[in-house]
Structure formats: structure tokens, C-alpha cells
Amino acid sequence: MSELKQSIEEIVEKHLPDENHFIVEVKMTEKTGKTTLSILIDADEGLNIQTCANVSRAVSEELEAKDIMPGAYILEVSSPGLDYPLSSRRQYQKNIGRELKVLKTSGEELVGKLLEVNTAGVKMLVKKKEKGKKATEEEVVLPFEEMKKTIVQVSFK
């Protein structure tokens, strides 16, 4: 399966419009005998539905031509969506300046503004609230290995 997944990732990579677009995840799931191939892509400057449609068409044609997928399958190409956890450094980079909710491997939860991303982790401006005191802000450096799940917080301001 991992060899198949790698082949599919190579095909997807080839059909992305430019270097600003990238693969977030390629996942195959099976329910009641039907295989669904889900491809999540993103872009540094945002992704539009036409790009998803073009990638879907091109990938589908190549998968069919090379007869890579065993049996019938459903192909879905989309962006990760707001509720999808960040998984790559590139996604973090894209979200600098936005508010994130981070669940640490220790179980602690932090909410704050993403300030910086480097190869080891991120720097965030986190609000600290103590009972009876005014909330303060503190810069926190978090290594990627201490971050279990990170979600971008939606703001309507």
C-alpha cells in the first residue's frame, strides 16, 4: 500500500500547477467494498476550486492510463479545510499571523498568535490568564515534536 501511495503522490506532484502548490495528504479508505482515494492539496497563496478540479482530472486520467488503482474507486481532490489539523511546516508558514489552538503531547492546550516558524518548531504569542489578575501575553517556543494537534482558529473580526 505504501508503494501505491508513493506512486500516487508522484502523479499528484506532477500535476500541481506550480511550486506554490503542495500535497498535504494522500489517503485511501475502504468502506463497504468501495475504495475512496482522498487527495488533500494546498497552496501558499490559497487554493481555488478550479485548481482542485484540474488536478482531479489530470490525476484521474493518469491513474486510468497506467491502471494503478486496483478495482473501482472514488477520487476526491480538495483543500484540507479549516478544521483539518496542520501537518507540515509549509502549512504553518502559510498561517503566520493567525491564531492557532495547539494541543501539546503533554495534554496542555495553548491558544495564541503564530509569530514565526523554523525547522525545529514555532514561536507563538500566547495569552496567559491567572485568577484575579489581568491577562498577559507571553512568547512561547514550541518544538514540533511537542505538538500533537494544531488547528487554525476562525476569526470573524
Image (tube, rainbow, N blue to C red):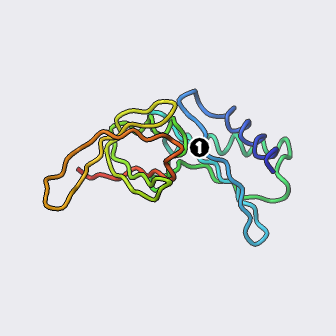
Residue 104 lies, in percent from the top left, at 46, 53
Residue at (44, 55) in percent of width and height = 103
**Mark 1: which amino acid?**
Val
Relative to 77, does residue 15 appear above or below in the rendering? Answer: above
Residue at (51, 52) in percent of width and height = 148
Closer to the camera in the image, 60 or 151? 151
- The secondary structure type at the circle numbered 1 is strand
Quarter-of-image position of residue 53: top right
Residue 117 lies, in percent from the top left, at 43, 33
Q: Which residue is mark 1?
A: 24
Residue at (33, 38) in percent of width and height = 97
The residue furthest bottom is: 32
The residue furthest top is: 19
Closer to the camera in the image, 20 or 136? 136
Residue at (85, 58) in percent of width and height = 71
Residue 120 lies, in percent from the top left, at 51, 33
